[in-house]
Image (cartoon, helix red, strand yellow):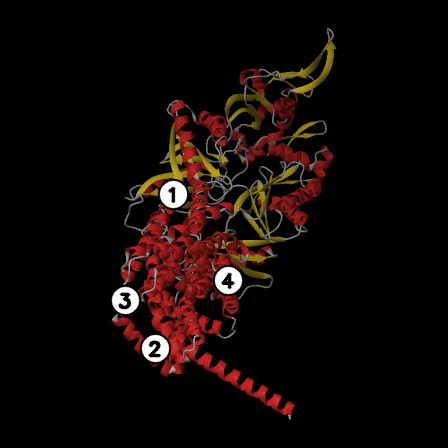
Amino acid sequence: MNVSRWGIAHPIPAALAFVILCVFGFWGWRQLPISTLPDFTPPEIDIKVTLPGASPSQLETDVTRKVEDAVAGIANIDKLLSTVNEGQSRTRILFELGRDMDTALEEVRDAMDRVRSDLPAEIDEPQITRLTVLGPTMLTYAIESDRLALDELSWFVDDTVKKVLFGTPGVGTVSRIGGLDREVRVDLRPDMLQAFGLTAGTVSMQLARIQVERAGGRTTVGGGEQTVRTIATVHSAAALADYPISLPDGRSVRLSTIATVSDSHAEPRDMALLNGKPVVGFGIQRAVKTSEVAVGDEVRGRIAELAREHPEVRFIEVDSVVEEARNSYNASMSMLAEGALLAVAVVWLFLRDRRATWISALALPLSVIPTFGVMHLLGFSLNLLSLLAMAVVIGILVDDAIVEVENITRHRALGKTPMQAAGEAADEIGIAVIATSATLAAVFIPVAFMPGQIGLFFREFGWTAATAVLFSLLVARLLTPMLAAYFMTRKLKQLSEPAWVRFYMRLVGHALARPWRTLATAFATFVVALALLPLIPRTFVPPNNESRSTVLLELPPGSTLQDTAAVAEQARRLLADIPELKSVFARVGSQSGTGFTTAGSGEVRKAQVNLRFTDKRQRTMQQLEVEVRRRLEKLAGVRVSFAALGPGDRLELVVVGRDPVQLAAAAQRIEAAMRGVRGLSGVQSSASLLQPEIVIVPDPARAADLGVSTVDIAEAARIATTGDFLRNLPKLNLAERQIPIRVQVVEAARDDASLLSLMRVPARGGAVPLSAVADIRDSSGPAVIERYNRERNVKISGELNGNPLGPVMAEVRKLPAVQNLPPGVRILPGGDAEAFVDLFVGFALAMLTGVLSVYVVLLMLFNSPSMPLVILAAIPLCGVGAFGALLVSGYALSLPSLVGLLMLTGVSTKNSILIVDYAIIGERAGLPRREAIIDACHKRVRPVIMTTIAMGAGMVPVAFSLAADGNFRAPLGISVIGGLLTSTLLSLLAVPAAYWLVAEWVSRFRSRRAARRQAREARSAA
């Protein structure tokens, strides 16, 4: 069925179809969530095992290796990544894409059930989780009060704020930052323990046995059944102080005699500082498939309600990505509008007819709006990439309509009626329009199927662009001819031929007279493009210019929380007079409050300082970070680095090996060498620091004589220094919470190594000092252990400071320390370097698949194996313009510029299709080949130039955006505009020459084949 003629004959159903599509699109647009990036949940399952107070070396042996061995046999595992810190082992299982994660989660749980008996009995129950929240913290708040203490503010967050926010649709997690947890402390006096023959473990055990509530069964009283319950007898710290403790000789003593009992707080392992003042913070992450903007606005509304209900508490928003998502969305929509207006202006400049321009312009909203509906059905969101897809095709969407309208205008100028002109023009241009849109769709769709995480990331880009292009094809074939037939009724005069067309036709004559020279010139431009390519730096993505930065401070192992807090405050003071700085929020220690703090866990020597800068500023983020680093160099003995807020910020190498000694030595040499690489700063290694340890070595002979086991020694040491495990602690039961009771020796005894030797250990016949059964030594061990696929690894990273990743990575690979590795040690790309490789491989495959798809589409449409090759010959011609534009503008070859090159593979064929299709039509109509080519160039040069300028105009807002994320979009727009320029100018001459040569060769080949066939037939007849 001829869709165009059906639309002309049935205008009402055609118009109604697009009304329905627009309603569908508006409905989808209102439902689409707004986010910074596409929703992407990695196929990852985390296993976290906690053993408070355990060293990384101990955890690696007792826990991490056993967990890795247990899960290694599960199918479709891509990587096993483990990180072991003090008191905690975390193993990340990264599965291959496409793995059923529900089944994988069950298999991981089964594996952990099997290995659980081999793990230390003292560990907390392993936490097995699948990632269900997205990205970084969406909103971070700090709260302060003149009336409430920090422990009261902490409970306010845990009890009130979390309840309110978890009831907010779209909220995934709410995590407390800093604060204090209420705790009843029983600080034992070592001299009194020795005097009464008690140990810390004995006291803790007695309190745990009495301070419990247990079911006591049931009984029948008075003819009715009643339950029996045993309740705890202590409900306050004062009552606990009076509680009798049994002694070994049968007597008892009040707890207050041997200990100081206080209603206090747990030992803090992290804290939050806002502009130098201790506060309590909390961070919010959104759930999957929700809108950052909508959820963020709802959360802010709930916080405002809480502020009104609790005037004694002040809520301060210290960090947010909501505005970034909102600004990115607004900037993208503005670019869509600006690109559309520029494209429509180009149409007006060429056609100089209001109705023709209006009909062409309608293709933009009628293509974009229904696309929103399809995006909603596919579960997409309005994010940087999906809206970028809209922006890059905005100039393309009007192309098909331009071609249709221009052809109809030309037929009207010949004196035909509107109906006749619309019908005949649509028939004449039909194959060309379908071919151009089909080739573009064939280029964009492979992007959605790129392998790896990059492919999932670009899935929305590919499908959104392809969908919009297909809707533009529907508009051009169904609606545009119908509107032209009924509204372009004014008689048009024959337009005079512009001088540039006459000049172009003279060039075409020269090109056809010297086709081989023309193609040689085109090939030379391709060689120039290849020569330019090595001159362009390569990177993953361009550096961002957001208004926030995160500084990481790392003190030497053994530093206390107070030391780290003092350094964080010193850093704030050093940065305070930076004019662009708005606020400083510091998080000291690696543990966020999520309930009761487990003493002995967490790295208190690290701090994360979040800096917020003004949006309107002269200096870029990279310049500000250089200034921040320069000032923080005054912090003696402190490692300073910047957290990567996005890709393109850091270079990372992963050094892997089984021999820890060789691995550490190789990593140390590589780290030292990398410090001398230009463009790289803040180089640091994850294995270059050792933390001090106190090692208790039992004496087997003495311990056996006294009946003391190693387990008894370890348990006594743990309870005396950090208290028992949280699950074993007795608790005070209050109205809506439980307060743990922690038994330890007094702080003075815990901090004195000589007093540690006097700690009492249960033995046969009574308690004995620790020094009687063990030796106490000073030692050291790794502060952190990292493992990659069941081998130890060391990560060496550095900041790029806005420099391209590719050249810096090339310099690193040339280092002798990298070239000459010990046996068994190897280097793997990590972080952005790994994504960098995946990116170029993925896009290379997508481009190859796209070109093959375009060839197949053209083969089916033209029914000729040779003509698609003529059309595809235009693709290499865009390289010199794209690469040259990147080189001149100073942008690197990165993810967005690769998207531009991919887009050019489809766009560059559009012009060729228009010329080749009309030349074929001319030849079929009986024109000599040369005249057919010249006529095709003459008739098609105007729509070719119009569509090219319209596409370029649509890309101008992308190339020169002043939005915060304009750095990401600009390389795409620059490369497309440059590629369009050279591809159009060269293909207008190279394609006619190529068509002439290929058609002549095909004719000669067919003539020879026909002659041979006739000769065979003649011989057969004879």
Asked if the residues shown at circle 2 and circle 4 are in contact, with their CB atoms under 8 angstroms apart, the answer is no
Image quarter where the C terminus lies is bottom right
Which label sits on residue 494? 3
Q: With 158 as the anchor, is 363 left or right in this view?
A: left
Residue 58 placement (x, y as % from top left):
62, 44
The earlier-in-sequence mark between 1 and 3 is 1
| Amino acid type at mark 4 | Ala
Q: Nearer the viewer, residue 577 or 530?
A: 530
Assess whether mark 2 and mark 3 are in contact (beta carbons under 8 angstroms). no
Viewed as shown, does residue 780 lie left or right of 389?
right
Viewer-nearest of labels 2 and 4? Answer: 2
Query: How would you rate the neighbour count of disc 3 (Cα within 10 Å): few for under 14, some for 14-19, many for 20 or more?
Result: few
Name the secondary structure under disc 1: helix
Residue type highlighted by circle 2: Val
The residue mark sitting in front, 1 or 3, is 3
Q: Mark 1 or mark 2: which comes first in sequence?
A: 1
In space, the residues marked 3 and 4 are separated at their CA atoms by: 45 Å
Q: Circle 1: is it few (<14), some (14-19), or many (20+) Cα within 10 Å?
A: some
Name the secondary structure under disc 2.
helix
Q: Which residue is mark 4?
A: 846
| Residue 897 picture location, percent across and down | 41, 60
Q: Secondary structure at mark 4?
A: helix
From the image, tell me which residue sits under label 1.
Answer: 326
Q: Which residue is mark 2?
A: 508
Q: Amino acid at mark 1?
A: Arg
Q: CA distance from mark 1 to mark 2?
A: 50 Å
| Image spot of residue 380 (x, y percent) | 48, 47
Distance (Cα) linking label 1 and label 3: 49 Å
Q: Residue furthest top?
A: 222
